Amino acid sequence: MEFTSRDDTLLQEAKPIVKFCVLASGSSGNAALLVTQNTRILIDAGLSMKELRRRMESIGEDLARIDAVLITHEHSDHVAGLPVLGRAASGKNKLRAVFYLSRLTAPSIDWGETRPARVEEFQAGAAFQIGDIEVQSFSIPHDAADPVGFSLDAQGVRIAIATDLGYIPASVKFHLRRTDLLLLEANHDLDMLKVGPYPWSVKQRVMSRVGHLSNSAMADFLIEDLDSSTHRLVLGHLSEHNNHPAIVQVMASQSLEQRGLRTALTIAEQRRPSEVFLF
């Protein structure tokens, strides 16, 4: 499967079948967008509605055209914009989006006065169809009510998203196979975390098996388990205080080189969208 970014002039005249962009990734807000010719899915809504609209417009997309919003879990950096989106879906200038949350995550969301009419609850581990995109959910180890990752199959393109997980069990590794693009967490450098500003209780939480994935754990996965068919690796959810993109870049590049893989590498950012990946 060949892919390119929006900067690739070779495919400027070809109409993309599938488009993916990480709108924001980090401790202050997370969101990603998957687009086909017929369907648009927002994965997480950790930015304000105004900022989501602005970032989508910067890549030529319209928030009003979103068909669905998938939520991984209820932590604020993944759902901060959800109540306003919910009100917009119920108001005069309606969004047409349907909101998808796991059965145990749904009660954790504070929608405000009115829960949107179009909320679909699913059992973690369930597969379902949204337009021409097949969604497979899978449980991940994190200290939330019912956290999930997603693999999404669209027009023969497979994208997997696994952030906010303390470690990568075999069950998750299974869902990260045969991906064209993998969005994976690289949250913290262990040495930076240990001497950083967080209280010890928070450090223990981050380092736990239901916390966040360290650079070392990410690198071990690349060396031992990354599927050689993965064309693009996007590393995200970097801690602003306990990590640095240069460290992540070096560790991931060395791990890929050790495997002899030519997987393209991108570090997702908090303050601006990634490049737009076209398939």
Image (cartoon, rainbow, N blue to C red):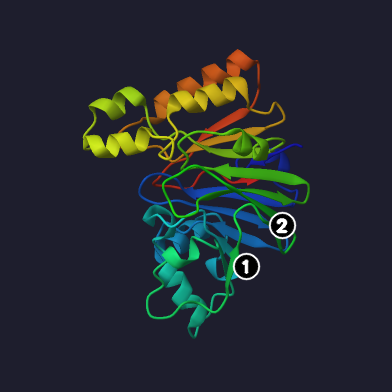
Q: Which residue is mark 2?
A: 133
Q: Is residue 61 left or right of residue 152?
A: left
- Compared with 71, 149 (above or below) is above
Residue 39, percent from left and from top: 68, 62
Comparing 108 with 219, the one in front is 108
- Compared with 119, 186 (above or below) is above
Q: In the rendered image, is residue 8 in sight?
A: no
Quadrant of the rendering where the C terminus is positioned: top right
Comparing 167 with 132, the one in front is 167
Q: Which residue is mark 1?
A: 67
Comparing 172 with 63, the one in front is 172
Q: Is residue 15 left or right of residue 33?
A: right
Residue name at image x 45 percent, y 44 percent: 142
Residue 56, percent from left and from top: 51, 58
Residue name at image x 37 percent, y 32 percent: 207
Amino acid of disc 1:
Asp
**Which element type, helix, strand or loop, lies under badge 2?**
strand
Task: Specify the quadrant of the image occupied by residue 112.
Answer: bottom left
Residue name at image x 41 percent, y 25 percent: 246
Residue 60, percent from left and from top: 57, 58
Task: Specify the quadrant of the image occupied by residue 83.
Answer: bottom left
Quick one: label 1, few (<14), some, or many (20+) residues within 10 Å? Answer: some
Quick one: label 2, few (<14), some, or many (20+) residues within 10 Å? Answer: many
Residue name at image x 63 percent, y 25 percent: 225
Disc ID at residue 198: none
Quadrant of the rendering where the N terminus is positioned: top right
